[in-house]
DNA sequence: ACTACGTCCTGCTTGC
DNA sequence: TGCAAGCAGGACGTAG
């Protein structure tokens, strides 16, 4: 699911449904999503069995569940990962990869069609897993330092969209919200960071934050059943998108037909009139 | 060091 | 109808 609002929706669900519970049994149905647990699937299960989940946290697109052992269960949803809280008697779904049984009527299930995502135990990571510490803060973090991010962007010759997607510059933003932020701030995604005025960079970051807060209020963006909360329900922000996925439709600001372009090997949607390259 | 590209996966949609 | 190419919300390793 991918981007910050969708991941935060999941975090809230975990906070409500699994925090305070103990993992009673672990079953890994496919090894790939556990590949980031370097000491192997057996150790992964051993480190989790009988352990209590004490909180549900997030930075950017990473989730982690602090454990009463001082470790953390870290999760990244990748492109198609889901964390579902489901009644234990519901049969395993097709893409169920990791099953965590709890001392509760519900299981916690990691379901992931494409398996770009994963789950692993971070040694001593309850407070802040090292893998998560390595990325930048996200715009919803109280400690987010906009001035520092503007300065970082100004030092780079990369395109602003590439910088927004770089989780070491600012975390949580993905392809949808990058396009939405750039549309809102009227900035072309290929403009080099070091050639954009401070005020415009600031507008982009503010727009990113605002659009993600708005999406969160609607339960996130879902185009299909792949992007759901822990109870399997979709969010409604798709209907509020101004740019992403709207090729050929009129820009709500100026009426021009929105354009889709390939850059960075991905689709980018923007208004060719409102968002000039120079 | 920084930057850009290919690759990792599966399944759905599109076009010949 | 059948089949192959194209596409998908992410991030990493590698090469320049």
Image (spheres, coloured by chain):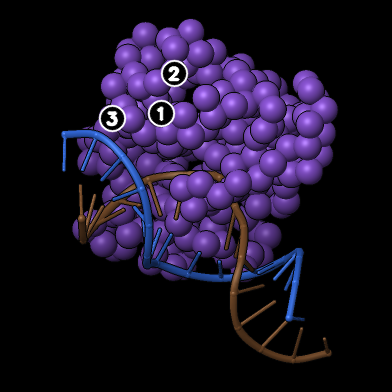
Chain colours: A purple, B blue, C brown
Give how far apart the Cα atoms at labels 2 and 3 are.
29 Å
Residue named by callout 3: A133
Q: Which of the 4 image quarters holds residue A194?
A: top left
Q: Residue at x 36, y 33 (%)?
A: A158
Q: Which of the 4 image quarters holds residue A92?
A: bottom right
Q: Position of residue A73 (x, y in %)?
A: 37, 42
Residue named by callout 1: A192
Element on which disc 2 rests: loop
Q: Say whether disc 3 or disc 1 marks the residue closer to the N-terminus.
A: 3
Q: Chain of mark 1?
A: A
Residue named by callout 2: A196
Q: Chain of mark 2?
A: A
Q: Is residue A165 left or right of residue A241?
A: left
Camera-nearest residue between A155 and A22: A155
- Is the Cβ of the residue at disc 1 closer than 8 Å to that at disc 2? yes
Crowd tier of the residue under label 1, counting other residues whose Cα lies within 10 Å: few below 14, some 14–19, many 20 or above: many
The answer to whether residue A60 of the structure is visible from this angle is: no
Camera-nearest residue between A225 and A23: A225
């Amino acid at each position: 699911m991918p981007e910050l609002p969708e991941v935060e929706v999941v975090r809230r669900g975990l906070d409500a449904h699994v925090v305070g519970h103990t993992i009673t049994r672990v079953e890994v149905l496919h090894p790939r999503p556990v590949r980031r647990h370097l000491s192997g699937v057996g150790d992964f299960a051993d480190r989790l069995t009988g352990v209590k989940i004490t909180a549900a946290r997030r930075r950017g697109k990473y989730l982690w569940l602090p454990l009463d052992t001082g470790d953390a269960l870290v999760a990244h949803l990748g492109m198609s990962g889901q964390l579902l809280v489901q009644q234990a008697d519901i049969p395993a779904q097709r893409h169920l990869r990791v099953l965590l049984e709890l001392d509760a009527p519900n299981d916690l299930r990691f379901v992931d069609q494409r398996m770009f995502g994963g789950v692993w135990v971070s040694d001593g990571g309850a407070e802040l897993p090292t893998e998560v510490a390595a990325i930048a803060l996200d715009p919803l973090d109280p400690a987010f330092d906009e001035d520092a991010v503007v300065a970082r962007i100004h030092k780079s010759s990369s395109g602003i969209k590439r910088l927004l997607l770089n989780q070491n510059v600012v975390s949580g933003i993905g392809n949808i919200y990058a396009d939405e932020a750039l549309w809102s701030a009227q900035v072309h995604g290929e403009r080099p960071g070091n050639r954009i005025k401070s005020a415009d960079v600031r507008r982009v970051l503010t727009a990113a934050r605002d659009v993600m807060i708005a999406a969160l209020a609607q339960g996130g963006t879902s185009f299909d059943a792949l992007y759901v909360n822990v109870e399997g329900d979709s969010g409604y922000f798709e209907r509020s998108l101004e740019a992403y996925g709207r090729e050929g439709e009129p820009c709500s600001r100026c009426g021009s037909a929105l354009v889709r372009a390939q850059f960075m090997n991905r689709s980018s949607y923007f208004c060719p009139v409102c968002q000039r390259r120079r």
